[in-house]
Image (cartoon, coloured by chain):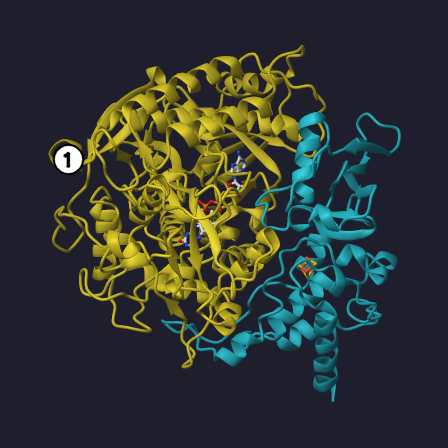
Chain colours: A yellow, B cyan
Amino acid sequence: MNLPRRRFDALIIGAGGGGLRAALQLARGEAHVAVVSKVFPTRSHTVAAHGGINAALAHVVPDNWHWHMYDTVKGSDYLGDQDAIEYLCRAAPRVVYELEHMGVPFSRLPDGRIYQRPFGAQSQDFGGAQAFRTCAAADRTGHAILQTLYQQNIRARTHFFDEHFALDLIRDTDGHVLGALVLDMASGEPLLIESKTTLLATGGAAQIYKTSSNASINTGDGLGMALRAGIPLQDMEFFQFHPTGIVGKGILITEGARGEGGFLVNGRGERFMDRYAPNSKDLAGRDVVSRAVMTEIREGRGCGEHENHVELRLDHLGTEVVNSLLPVIRDICQTFLGIDVSREAIPVAPTAHYMMGGIPTDRQGRVVAPERHGAEEAVPGLYAAGECACVSVHGANRLGGNSLLDILVFGRAAANHIAEYLGEHRYHRPLHQGSVDFALERLARWDRTGSGETVPGLREELKSTMDWHCGVFRDETVLKAGLDKLLDIERRLDDARLRDHSRRFNTARIEALELENLVETALATVVSALGRTESRGAHYREDFPQRDDAQWLRHSLYHRDGRQLEYKPVRMKPLSVDSIPPSIREY
Amino acid sequence: MRFSIYRYNPETDAEPRMQRFELESVSRGMMLLDALLRFKEQDESLVFRHACGEGHCGADGVNVNGVNVLACTTRLSILREPVQVTPLPGLPVIRDLVVDMEAFFSQYRAVRPYLIADDPEPEVERRQSPEQRAGLDGSFECILCACCTTQCPSWQNNPERYLGPAALLQAWRFLNDSRDTATEERLNDLAGPYALFRCRTVMNCVNVCPKDLNPTEAIGRIRRLMLKSSL
Ligand SMILES: Cc1cc2nc3c(=O)[nH]c(=O)nc-3n(C[C@H](O)[C@H](O)[C@H](O)COP(=O)(O)OP(=O)(O)OC[C@H]3O[C@@H](n4cnc5c(N)ncnc54)[C@H](O)[C@@H]3O)c2cc1C
Ligand code: SF4
């Protein structure tokens, strides 16, 4: 087959905040960069981040990066790598100021500095009073950041391949990653992009769940690509359920709503968070608040006819606060619920939101996998950043406002390392047809005709399975049953057929390719969850309700081959300060 | 509920046609996107764009009964039957409801939609008062859905020369940013009888914008600024 080819120094797969920040860093240098995205860049899901980005700027109350680091380590339930967390928190102010210089329209304080709001699990002085650490552009922070980054990339003349779907990485027999095979959606034809370096920045995967705050495009494609290239996934059992999704729909109500003074009540009108987190109350860690909400519901104190939710109240904040600081929340509730939040309560329940795990990387964004010389060995030519990567700064539970920070800090760090790598590797390695065939076969498989199961049918089954079998509360019986169902879905996937075999903008075909990635991601999640027989952060095992540091203070690595798990130590040593030892996590 | 949806795949169809679809049960709060997704389950060859489903990303602009909307935030209960769904007008159709937006984005790029600040960069943020920052409200929220531009008669008549409301709103967003230093260049870019001045204040853009933005007003402000700077 005569495959069209393009050649670049750096290929970036994903045009969300992570991918665009990396692209900008490289395009401003000397590298020839290509960005591939399955949607037009500003449609990427970073657009939906409302609340803001954390940085210890100390604009409202005293703050410093070390306190931010402490909160992040504690929030991670001590599973985060402390060197990476120190790097994250120290880089934060600089990254935020850079955004401001690029043009992000941050909200402002009266003196003209960047506005900061309080978010969950933020403290001053290592666990003291509430901090105000989240920099915001009203409640459109993600939109503002994403557009600004795209705009500056226009200025830097980055080369975009919009609406191109990445199918698989190309890896040679020496293990080097040489680029990717992508599908031009408009023409439906494959295109080979050769590149000296490849960065995966494909974002999250909460579409494995039915009730989710994520866009339909968040299907874990980068995770599937990594697994098929023989790279393991780290800490996949840790999936964050955000406590305030609109019940039944999963649409997110930002934590910023509680940051600005909103609170939760149960069916009896009680502010139940007082009982679960006496100090931080409604602003405790997300895992804590989600479990509290689910406990209220399970014990019969839910709201509404079905007692299946609790209520988030903002009606005491006044229209002024709502209009200036939470306009998106106001509009979402008006559009999707027909309610006026300045008078009525919002019905909420936990919604699948964020994947703490992902493709294992080091602080420079290099993908690391145990192949020959231990778990920290870099895969030559391959990088990952953003939600699809696991550095790990979020450990077992991410703090609100730390993901936008993560994607930018490590998108930038990865780009800096790529630039270095390009200096040392001046030529493309030879690429043999054999290494592309695998990816082409995956595409050709969907040309099989005949009757068989449908893609939407299997996808809906997968999502319900994940909701039922791998949610806020887990135990061995429920997880095992879930795994059996997933394995069955995986088997039946082979019999699935498309009805539409046309080429041009065939979204049914795209959905089929996405389903393959959803299945890979869901399996990784459930297998990892079964493996970890303790409760930590977002992973709560009712059969093992305690955290077990002696045995489990370690990262899991899931291999696709044989669905094996192995483990590697948490990096407890920060870069310059003392290690923060595990202790009881209370809010 | 009855629908009639535009279908055209240039790969296989000689010409476009309208296809009927029926929705058996319409639950309260159901959106047009929900209906389209149902139809795709019945006939997987039906093609449209969508992503966030909440009105933030701007992917799913379509024309419904003559008016441009976002499918994900349009309630079925307000629509007249049979609901006619066609692609955004004035742009080449790739397939079904998917249009080629390159012309729209190239007009966006033409207004240099990025902050240009030539003064030295401070080590912290540039200061901006809350009042100056408020000047960006009503423009930075644009999600580039193209609902406004493709509904504008002036743009439809001069799609090559008139930049259209969305691009001009973004021109204003940077002209009105207290941090931007390229006012003169920006105004020069917009000079001439077409780029800016083809706006006839028909206000279609204002009526259809899903984010309640007001490009017409922004265009008026650019004109006033231009007048002031030419005095
Ligand atoms: C509703 C919501 C609110 C949030 N609010 C906040 C907040 O206030 N603060 C915070 O810190 N975090 C927040 N988060 C989390 C944060 O927004 C995300 O984790 C982050 O934006 C992810 O960025 P990313 O660059 O990794 O991925 P994304 O922005 O999701 O981008 C992924 C990119 O990859 C591309 N892609 C994917 N697969 C393929 C493929 N196969 N081929 C080609 N391209 C592909 C997509 O087109 C897209 O361009 C929120 C998340 C949600 C869902
Ligand atoms: S101004 Fe409104 S209608 Fe026009 S592109 Fe922006 S959001 Fe869409």
Residue B12 vs residue A528, the one in the foreground: A528
For label 1, the SS is loop
Q: How many marks?
A: 1
Residue A236 vs residue A334, the one in the foreground: A334
- Residue A548 falls in image quadrant: top left
In the image: residue B213, left or right of residue A461: right
What quarter of the picture does the C terminus of chain A occupy? Answer: bottom left
* Placement of A518 over or under A109, stated as above or below: above
Whole-percent x, y for residue A521 in the image: 42, 28
Residue at the extreme top of the image, as rendered: A450
In the image: residue A276, left or right of residue A439: left
Whole-percent x, y for residue A457 in the image: 58, 23
Quick one: label 1, few (<14), some, or many (20+) residues within 10 Å?
Answer: few
**Which residue type carries mark 1?**
Asp
- Residue A182 falls in image quadrant: top right
**Residue A536 visible at all:** yes
Residue visible at 25% across and 72% down in the picture: A62
* Placement of A161 over or under A526, stated as above or below: below
Q: Chain of mark 1?
A: A
Q: Which residue is mark 1?
A: A548
**Residue B44 visible at all:** no
Whole-percent x, y for residue A65 in the image: 25, 62
Whole-percent x, y for residue A194 in the image: 52, 32
What quarter of the picture does the N terminus of chain A occupy? Answer: top right
- Residue B12 falls in image quadrant: top right
Residue visible at 81% across and 47% down in the picture: B80
For disc 1, does the CB lie below 8 Å from ligand 1? no
Residue visible at 83% across and 32% down in the picture: B19
Residue A88 vs residue A107, the one in the foreground: A107
